[in-house]
């Protein structure tokens, strides 16, 4: 019995070892050493010689007997071996053989053939006898190349078939929308990708042509019906949008149709390097929620911005934040002489430095870990570096947190702005551009009210300074809605909740918001700073507002899940200070057009009695420094009469 168990154990161990060998070694042909590939190639050349011998033997030709058959073939093999080494035909991984590998084989066999021809005729001129028959050399060269090439194609085909069969459950069938060079390059890259993720089964053509066409052995289908019907027809799981002629409306229609039927929607960038298949497939990504914004992106006047920034000194506050860091990167494109960064967050400021370092060709980069509320440090920075332009993005922005920390909202958003604005006047800064928010319009929370007071201060200060100075600082305010992807915004929150399996939490089913992307928001800041004359509040035509619950549904579907089945949506109630919709203008305000069709100037009331306003600000600061929240909010409501608290403990102060 013990002997039987021993034999059984040995068989089991042998079985496991052989299984491990074949699974791990065969599935990874890169394991084959180069010398093995070289030996296989030499065996193929020898086999080609045998075939050539029988072909020539059956013809009327008679081989020369200058040397024996073995010596002739030794010379042939030695020549081919030399050129295999010279062109490194053995260096590539066989399963990834490409056009380049085929060219190497062709060159190696061609050079070997011509070298043998040269050797043959050299021997003839010296000894008046030839070594080889010329037809024999030619036939051998052709057969060698064909067999070497077919060997690589066969191995590649067998390996791809093996991998596809092994991973058929993991490989997703996909349809590519587009029939240009980019779409075809993408399909080739996907089909040769290892490990394989997608199998392209068809192309969709935008036109309504009736003809039947094929490319790369795959059908081209005319876009006469819904994309979802075509995907279902080919039993695919999704679609890759690779047609860059699609309008925004056409894209949205396709995306909505596919998401409605639970098909995956992917997108990719334009193919720049057709040989770099790895980077092509890496660029495939989920269709971004930012691509669903129902408007064309803003286009900026580069010449105006360059005139303001190029070779100048630029100061950015809140530089490490989502808005500030994008401003920094866009400003660097215009090559300022010096860029001064201010932020109280040390680690993000350090990481920003690493990010922008490659772009600091002609720009001096100076980061400061500092708080804009510190008047002494801010004056030291401005007096030393004398900025020409200030982009003021530093602020506390989270509504619920500021509702319970009203004093901090005032000290940072109001006092910090006042300190910077006063210093801008003192040190004759040419332009001061402040980043504001749509929450400053008819504010319903402390954060929005603090930003409105900051707006009022910089506007009023400009009016005062203009009458006293020939070179008054231009104070400009930019106001926009929610920014997709910014710290604390709804999109990163929803993304995190989806990754964790849900639920997605929204505060109210009817809540709506305006949205823009971070690059768009920062482009608006730069554009406003270049076009403004001072005292303006610029607002952006942000298109139609988005229902947050619709945004949640689309994000769930884009992630490949089914809303309410895979990922639940929970309504948790409005947060303190939150309202159902935001406005870009107050009820009494009007707008004036600018030279940019997407940017308008808001005409809103300004401070009429500057001295009285300053007195109110001083009272507000005193309350804030003493952390007297009720007094802070009461004073804010005096300064901003339209400030009406919503869902907040401060409603009784209305």
Image (cartoon, rainbow, N blue to C red):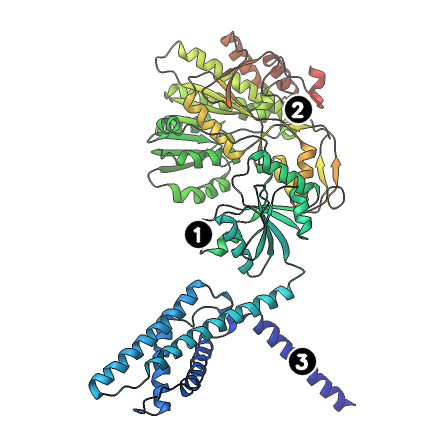
Disc number lying in front (3 or 1): 1
| Residue 47 sits above or below residue 361 on the image | below
- Kindly state the secondary structure of the residue where label 1 is placed: loop
The residue that appears at 66% across and 82% down in the rendered structure is 14
Q: Nearer the viewer, mark 2 or mark 1?
A: 1
Mark seen at residue 273: 1
Q: Split into 4 quadrants, where in the image is the C terminus?
A: top right
| Residue at mark 3 | 15
Give the position of the N terminus as an image quadrant: bottom right
First in sequence: mark 2 or mark 1?
A: 1
Question: Of the residues under marks 3 and 1, which one precedes in the sequence?
Answer: 3
Q: Which residue is mark 2?
A: 581
Q: CA distance from mark 2 to mark 3?
A: 68 Å
* Other-residue count near label 3 (Cα within 10 Å), few / some / many at <14 / 14–19 / ≥20: few
Of all residues, the one furthest to the top in this rendering is 609
**Residue 392 seen in the figure:** no
Residue 356 visible within the image: yes
Coordinates of residue 569 in the picture (x, y in percent): 74, 38
Residue beneath the point at 40% across and 18% down: 473
| Res 640 quadrant in image | top right
CA gap between label 3 and label 1 equals: 46 Å
Q: Is residue 496 left or right of residue 456?
A: right
Please state the horizontal and vertical placement of residue 262, each as a whole percent of the image.
Answer: 70, 45
The residue positioned 37% from the left and 90% from the top of the image is: 70
Q: Quick one: label 1, few (<14), some, or many (20+) residues within 10 Å?
A: few
* SS type, badge 3: helix
**412 relative position to 560: left or right:** left
Q: Nearer the viewer, residue 425 or 134?
A: 134
Q: Position of residue 539 (x, y in %)?
A: 53, 22
């Amino acid at each position: 019995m013990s002997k039987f168990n021993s034999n059984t154990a040995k068989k089991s161990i042998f079985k496991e070892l052989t299984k491990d060998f074949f699974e791990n070694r065969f599935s990874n042909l890169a394991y084959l050493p180069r010398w093995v590939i070289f030996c296989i190639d030499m065996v193929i050349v020898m086999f080609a010689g045998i075939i050539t011998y029988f072909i020539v033997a059956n013809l009327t030709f008679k081989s020369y007997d200058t040397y024996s058959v073995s010596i002739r073939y030794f010379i042939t093999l030695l020549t081919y071996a030399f050129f295999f080494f010279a062109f490194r035909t053995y260096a590539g991984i066989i399963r990834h053989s490409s056009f380049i590998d085929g060219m190497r084989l062709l060159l190696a066999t061609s050079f070997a053939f011509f070298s043998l021809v040269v050797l043959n005729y050299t021997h003839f001129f010296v000894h008046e006898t030839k070594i080889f028959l010329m037809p024999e050399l030619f036939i051998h060269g052709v057969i060698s190349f064909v067999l070497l090439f077919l060997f690589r194609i066969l191995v590649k085909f067998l390996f791809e078939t093996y991998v596809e069969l092994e991973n058929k459950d993991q490989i997703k069938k996909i349809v590519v929308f587009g029939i240009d060079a980019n779409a075809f390059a993408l399909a080739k890259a996907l089909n040769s990708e290892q490990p394989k993720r997608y199998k392209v089964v068809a192309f969709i053509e935008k036109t309504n042509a009736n003809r039947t066409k094929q490319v790369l052995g795959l059908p081209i289908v005319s876009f006469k019906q819904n994309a979802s019907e075509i995907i279902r027809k080919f039993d695919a799981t999704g679609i890759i949008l690779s047609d860059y002629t699609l309008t925004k409306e056409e894209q949205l229609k396709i995306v909505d149709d596919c998401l409605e039927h639970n098909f995956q929607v992917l997108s990719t960038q334009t193919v720049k390097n057709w040989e770099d298949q790895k980077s092509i497939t890496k660029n495939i990504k989920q269709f971004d929620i930012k691509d669903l914004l129902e408007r064309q992106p803003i286009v900026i006047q580069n010449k105006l911005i360059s005139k303001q920034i190029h070779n100048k000194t630029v100061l950015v506050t809140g530089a490490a934040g989502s808005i500030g860091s994008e401003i920094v990167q866009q400003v660097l494109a215009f090559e300022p002489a010096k860029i001064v960064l201010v932020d109280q967050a040390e680690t993000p400021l350090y990481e920003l430095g690493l990010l922008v370092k490659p772009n600091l060709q002609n720009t001096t980069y100076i980061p400061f870990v500092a708080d804009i509320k510190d008047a002494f440090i801010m004056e030291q920075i401005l007096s030393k570096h004398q900025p020409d332009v200030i982009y003021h993005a530093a602020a506390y922005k989270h509504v619920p947190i500021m509702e319970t920390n009203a004093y901090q909202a005032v000290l940072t958003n109001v006092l910090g702005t006042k300190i910077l604005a006063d210093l801008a006047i003192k040190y004759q800064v040419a332009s001061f551009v402040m980043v504001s928010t749509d929450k400053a319009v008819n504010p319903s929370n402390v954060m929005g009210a603090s930003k409105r007071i900051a707006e009022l201060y910089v506007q009023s200060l400009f009016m005062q300074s203009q009458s006293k100075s020939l070179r008054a600082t231009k104070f400009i305010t930019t106001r926009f809605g929610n920014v997709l992807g910014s710290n604390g915004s709804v999109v990163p929150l929803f993304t995190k909740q989806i990754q964790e399996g849900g639920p997605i939490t929204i505060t109210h089913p009817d809540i709506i918001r305006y949205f823009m992307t971070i690059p768009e928001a920062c482009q608006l800041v730069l554009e406003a700073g270049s076009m403004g004359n001072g005292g303006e509040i610029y607002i952006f035509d942000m298109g139609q507002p988005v229902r947050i619950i619709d945004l949640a549904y689309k994000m769930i579907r884009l992630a490949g899940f089914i809303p309410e089945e895979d990922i639940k949506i929970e309504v948790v109630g409005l947060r303190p200070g939150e309202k159902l919709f935001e406005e870009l203008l107050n009820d009494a305000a009007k707008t004036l057009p600018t030279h940019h069709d997407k940017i308008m100037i808001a005409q809103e009331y300004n401070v009429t009695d500057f001295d009285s306003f300053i007195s109110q600000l001083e009272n507000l600061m005193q309350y804030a420094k003493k952390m007297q929240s009720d007094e802070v909010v009461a004073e804010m409501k005096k300064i901003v009469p339209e400030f009406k608290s919503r869902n907040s403990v401060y409603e009784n102060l209305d």
